[in-house]
């Protein structure tokens, strides 16, 4: 189906205690196109594209996709406007990963010491 991501709208992941897990925040430069697009639908489309293809994700390169996404559609790309990942974007993401790794290390050390 062309707009398969719409079937996932309104569904959320939950943890073992049935608490809804907050969805990821997408970068500001990543904007969806097409009927009824939202961040959750865009996240599903991008995650699927990353999972099913080894090709780079560039988004829909044609500006006409905003007028009629059913006609002007590159089906190998998710329904988002074309975007470019800059070196600054990569650097910021690397810093976030390092911060999260540090927090994980501290949590694991605290767990080991508490035992």
Image: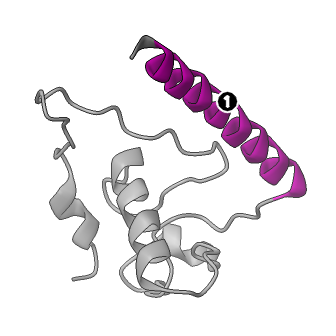
Q: Where is residue 107 shown, x and y percent of the image?
A: 52, 22
Q: Where is residue 43 shown, x and y percent of the image?
A: 42, 55
Q: Is residue 107 magenta?
A: yes
Q: Does residue 68 appear anywhere in the picture?
A: no
Over which residues does the magenta segment extend?
Answer: 86-113
Viewer-proximal residue among 2 and 90: 90
Q: Is residue 85 left or right of residue 39?
A: right
Q: Main secondary structure of the magenta part?
A: helix
Q: Residue at x 39, y 17 (%)?
A: 115
Relative height, residue 42 to residue 111 (above, below)? below
Viewer-proximal residue among 16 and 12: 16
For the residue carrying disc 1, how many other residues have a C-alpha within 10 Å: few (<14), some (14-19), or many (20+)? few
Which residue is most to the top? 114
Q: Where is residue 12 shown, x and y percent of the image?
A: 20, 42
Q: Residue at x 60, y 22 (%)?
A: 106
Q: Residue at x 56, y 23 (%)?
A: 109
Label 1 secondary element: helix
Q: Does residue 44 appear anywhere in the picture?
A: yes
Which residue matches tag 1? 102
Which quarter of the figure is the N terminus placed in?
Answer: bottom left
Relative height, residue 69 to residue 12 (above, below)? below
């Amino acid at each position: 189906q062309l707009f398969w991501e719409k079937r996932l709208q309104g569904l959320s992941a939950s943890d073992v205690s049935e608490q809804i897990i907050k969805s990821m925040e997408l970068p500001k430069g990543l904007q969806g196109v097409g009927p009824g697009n939202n961040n959750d639908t865009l996240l599903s489309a991008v995650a699927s594209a990353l999972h099913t293809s080894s090709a780079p994700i560039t988004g829909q390169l044609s500006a006409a996709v905003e007028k009629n996404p059913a006609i002007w559609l590159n089906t190998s790309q998710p329904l988002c406007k074309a975007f470019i990942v800059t070196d600054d974007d990569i650097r910021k993401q690397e810093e976030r990963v390092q911060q999260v790794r540090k927090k994980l290390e501290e949590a694991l050390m605290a767990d080991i010491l508490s035992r």
